[in-house]
């Protein structure tokens, strides 16, 4: 212990010309914060260490006896940030407090992240006699923060990717870039390269360069590589940090990179699964929507199905056109919810509706069958059904919670005031009541799902008014009209539109295709 | 566009719902409603609700049916004109009855 005494006494003398109280020495010796006290020589050869406490020795793996009388520069190395050291000198010369962070080295050459602050000890004339540096090994904090930022970046990228999932390539590229950036930041050095070789996605690459200086020469370039593995253990790619010098490699925390890789696997498989589900729902939807080559004699028909803009909303809307003995039946419906479940219920309802209408069953009975189907599937659906008479100029309309159709023609456009019963699945034996509307030659009925008129932060009635106003002025083929109202929608929801016009103008092209 | 929904319970038979009840937020509301005993005469204050989608209506309707079946009831308070119109267009005026007064401190 005698070897330790001398520097302590030196400090005692400088602090106030007398011995420091034992309690203060004890505090310095006991604290877990590394403390280093140096002389105040800023000119070459610079300050020398006059005291370090045991916490300092523990952090730096240097005994007190090894550092007393030496320069604090023994802590520095190639990865130490020169700019921080320059600022340190400037602050001390100017008599300011300094605090900063950089990389220092332990006795065995292992680099670590250090944060420290320095205050001057002044004599009675206000002249600095010593500097007291309080230090902390912040390696774990730095790494944890980088991992947190990388994971956050990946989550944000996934949200962004899901916002436009129809563009599979762009969504994947967004994710891979985020993986590369995250891995690059966590590594802190070199170039992060992400290689994906998922058989279902195909090969993809992304890279991110963190190095500001020139790349390491190929001869001494070193790589650190971690696999991107799914939870089922299948490796779908790798994260490689290339372009590293040896000392940089020692700074790279492999477990942290593995955590980034783990999150990367989760978001990449999440995106792929989501896209698979979405495309299944979309295919199912498209397969179920009717395709007729020609409109029945005396009618023109136009229809559209548009998936939601954000791509999330797909799978619940449908329409159908069915010919019966003396009527043309028009159906539009919307199953609550989205995705495969909604698409499946939609397919079931559409099939049931078409079959029941072809069998010319009473409307009450049709609604009852559909109500039960919705209850079976624990969901609800809205539906409007029109029977457009082929031998009189009128149509009868029933609605289960569905938005009313618009009747439009040469005399203008207006909502048909239907009396809806609750949505299918919640009928509770209520009987739908028909509304009869005239539908003379040249007039059309347009049915739609709420995606066509619904806008957030706007009364629904505004959307309905807008649709009526557009249809009142509409001219041209029914196809063009449906195109123009479909184009004016601004909804995130998916949208189905179907319109039927009795005895179209002579110039209208026939037959019309349903899309 | 992430929707926000806040649900609070100023008294045991009143829920105050603020924000948008859409596909994303409807499950949150459904969970809160499911906690309410079926015999409750429940009021839902929609004065702060700017938007209800079909998914939101489905949740309200399911709650109304559960409460009615359990001897309770559901009334909507302070619904905006838009929400009222949506309920009428959906044929739910009888199923989701509206109360005139706000059964609330505000």
Image: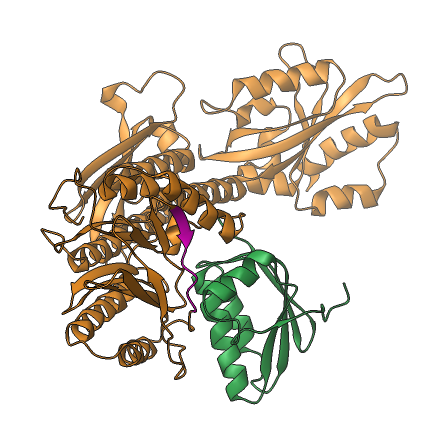
Chain colours: A orange, B green
Q: Position of residue A210 (x, y in %)?
A: 39, 26
Q: In the image, A419: left or right of A302?
A: right
Give the magenta range. A412-419
Report which quarter residue A247 is drawn in: top left
Judge whether A355 appears above or below A9 on screen.
below
Q: How many marks?
A: 0
Residue extending furthest toward the top: A44
* Along the line of sight, the residue nearer the viewer: B11 or A84: B11
Q: Position of residue A66 (x, y in %)?
A: 57, 31
Is A106 contained in the magenta span?
Answer: no
Q: Is residue A373 visible?
A: yes
* Along the line of sight, the residue nearer the viewer: A26 or A403: A403
Q: In the image, A202: left or right of A116?
A: left
Judge whether A250 appears above or below A381 on screen.
above
Name the residue rendered at 23%, 42% in the picture.
Answer: A479
Residue extending furthest toward the bottom: B71
Report which quarter residue B75 is drawn in: bottom right
- Quadrant where the N terminus of chain A sits is top right
Name the residue rendered at 30%, 57% in the picture.
Answer: A439
Q: In the image, A153: left or right of A199?
A: right
Name the residue rendered at 33%, 39% in the picture.
Answer: A474
Report which quarter residue A350 is drawn in: bottom left
* Along the line of sight, the residue nearer the viewer: B44 or A175: B44
Residue extending furthest toward the right: A124
Name the residue rendered at 69%, 37% in the picture.
Answer: A4
Judge whether A87 appears above or below B6 on screen.
above
Q: Position of residue A295 (x, y in %)?
A: 14, 53
Q: Is residue A492 visible?
A: no
């Amino acid at each position: 212990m005698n070897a330790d005494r001398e520097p302590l006494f030196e400090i005692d003398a400088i602090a106030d010309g007398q011995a420091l109280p034992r309690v203060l020495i004890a505090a310095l010796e006991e604290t877990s914060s590394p403390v280093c006290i140096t002389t105040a020589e800023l000119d070459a050869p610079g300050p020398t260490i006059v005291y370090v406490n045991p916490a300092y020795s523990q952090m730096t793996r240097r005994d007190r006896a090894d550092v007393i009388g030496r320069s604090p520069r023994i802590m520095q190395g190639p990865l130490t940030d020169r700019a921080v050291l320059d600022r340190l000198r400037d602050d001390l010369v100017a008599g300011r407090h300094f605090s900063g962070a950089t990389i220092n080295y332990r006795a065995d050459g292992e680099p670590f992240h250090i944060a420290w602050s320095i205050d001057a000890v002044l004599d009675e004339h206000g002249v600095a006699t010593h500097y007291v540096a309080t230090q902390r090994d912040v390696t774990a904090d730095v790494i944890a923060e980088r991992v947190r930022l990388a994971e956050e970046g990946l989550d944000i990228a996934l949200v962004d990717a899901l916002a436009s999932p129809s563009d599979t390539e762009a969504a994947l590229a967004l994710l891979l870039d985020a993986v590369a950036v995250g891995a690059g930041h966590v590594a802190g050095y070199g170039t992060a390269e992400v290689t994906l070789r998922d058989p279902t996605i195909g090969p993809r690459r992304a890279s991110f360069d963190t190095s500001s200086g020139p790349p390491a020469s190929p001869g001494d370039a070193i790589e650190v590589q971690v696999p991107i593995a799914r939870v089922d253990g299948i490796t779908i790619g790798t994260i490689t940090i290339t372009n590293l010098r040896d000392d940089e490699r020692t700074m790279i925390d492999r477990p942290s990179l593995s955590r980034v890789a783990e999150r990367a696997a989760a978001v990449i498989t999440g995106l792929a699964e989501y896209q698979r589900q979405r495309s299944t729902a979309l295919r199912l939807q498209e397969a179920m929507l009717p395709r007729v080559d020609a409109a029945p004699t005396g009618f023109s028909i136009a229809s559209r199905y548009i998936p939601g803009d954000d791509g999330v909303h797909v799978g619940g809307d449908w329409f159908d056109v069915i010919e019966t003995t003396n009527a043309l039946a028009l159906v539009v419906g919307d199953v609550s919810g989205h995705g495969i479940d909604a698409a499946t219920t939609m397919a079931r309802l559409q099939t049931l509706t078409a079959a029941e209408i072809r069998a010319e069953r009473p409307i009450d009975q049709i609604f009852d069958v559909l109500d039960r189907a919705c209850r079976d599937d624990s969901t609800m659906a809205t539906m409007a059904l029109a029977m457009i008479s082929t031998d009189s100029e009128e149509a009868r309309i029933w609605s289960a919670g569905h938005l009313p159709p618009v009747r439009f023609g040469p005399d203008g456009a207006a909502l048909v005031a239907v009396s809806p019963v609750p949505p299918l699945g919640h009928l509770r034996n209520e009987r739908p009541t028909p509304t009869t509307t005239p539908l003379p030659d040249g007039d059309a009925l347009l049915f739609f799902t709420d995606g066509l008129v619904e806008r957030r932060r706007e009364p629904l009635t505004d959307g309905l008014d807008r649709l009526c106003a557009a249809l009142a002025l509409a001219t041209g083929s029914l196809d063009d009209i449906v195109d123009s109202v479909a184009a004016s929608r601004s909804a995130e929801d998916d949208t189905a539109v179907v319109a039927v016009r009795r005895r179209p103008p002579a110039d209208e092209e026939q037959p019309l295709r349903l899309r | 566009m992430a929707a926000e929904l806040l649900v609070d319970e100023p008294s045991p038979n009143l829920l105050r719902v603020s924000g948008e009840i859409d596909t994303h937020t409807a499950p949150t509301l459904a969970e809160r409603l499911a906690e309410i005993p079926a015999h409750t005469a429940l009021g839902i204050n929609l004065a702060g609700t700017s938007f209800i989608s079909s998914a939101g209506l489905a949740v309200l309707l399911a709650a109304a049916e559960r409460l009615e079946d359990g001897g309770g009831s559901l009334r909507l308070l302070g619904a905006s004109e838009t929400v009222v119109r949506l309920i009428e267009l959906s044929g739910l005026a009888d199923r989701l009855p509206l109360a005139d007064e706000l059964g609330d401190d505000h």
